[in-house]
Image (cartoon, helix red, strand yellow):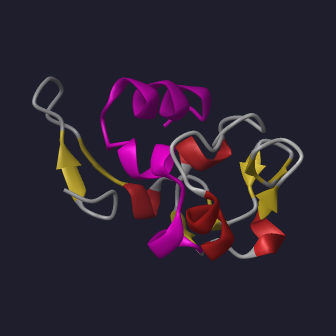
Amino acid sequence: MTSLDQHDSAATGETWSCQTCGACCSFSAEWPRFSLESEADIARIPAVHVDDAAGRMRCVGDRCSALVGEVGSDTACSVYAVRPEVCRACEPGDPECLMARARWGL
C-alpha cells in the first residue's frame, strides 16, 4: 500500500487518505530527517526542499516545504516520487500518523 492509498483502520473502522490529511508533513520542523538515504537519493530531491545543514527536509515552521495544499483538506507531496525513506515508511493509521492527526485535531 502506498501513502496515496486509502487505509481502513481495523481497530477503529475509520478511513484515512493522505491526500486529505497532510498532518505528518506538518508535525515538526525536526522531521523528516534523512537517515537511510544515500547522497544520490538526496540529490534527486530538489535542493529548495533540502536543509543540508540539518540533514532533513526544509521546513517552514513545522511544515515540510514539499507539502502543498491545506492540512486536513487537500494535500500532496510535491516530491512524492523522490521523498525520503521516513516518508515512505509512514503509513495511514500507524502510530506516527495517529500522533500527527491528533496534534491537528483530525
Which residue extends farthest front? 39
Q: Main secondary structure of the magenta part?
A: helix
| Residue that appears at 78% across and 41% down | 62
**Residue 54 found in image quarter:** top right
Q: How many marks?
A: 0
Question: From the viewer's perspective, is residue 24 above or below residue 46?
Answer: above
| Residue that appears at 67% across and 38% down | 31
| 48 and 92: which is toward the camera | 48
Q: Is residue 103 magenta?
A: yes
| Residue that appears at 64% across and 60% down | 39
Question: From the viewer's perspective, is residue 20 above or below residue 30?
Answer: below
As drawn, is 12 to the left or to the right of 91?
left
Region rendered in magenta: 79-106
- The N terminus appears in which quarter of the rendering? bottom left
- Residue 38: image location, x then y, percent: 56, 55
As drawn, is 81 to the left or to the right of 61?
left
| 103 and 94: which is toward the camera | 94
| 58 and 36: which is toward the camera | 36
Q: Is residue 30 magenta?
A: no
- Residue 66: image location, x then y, percent: 68, 66
**Residue 32 found in image quarter:** top right
| 82 and 10: which is toward the camera | 82
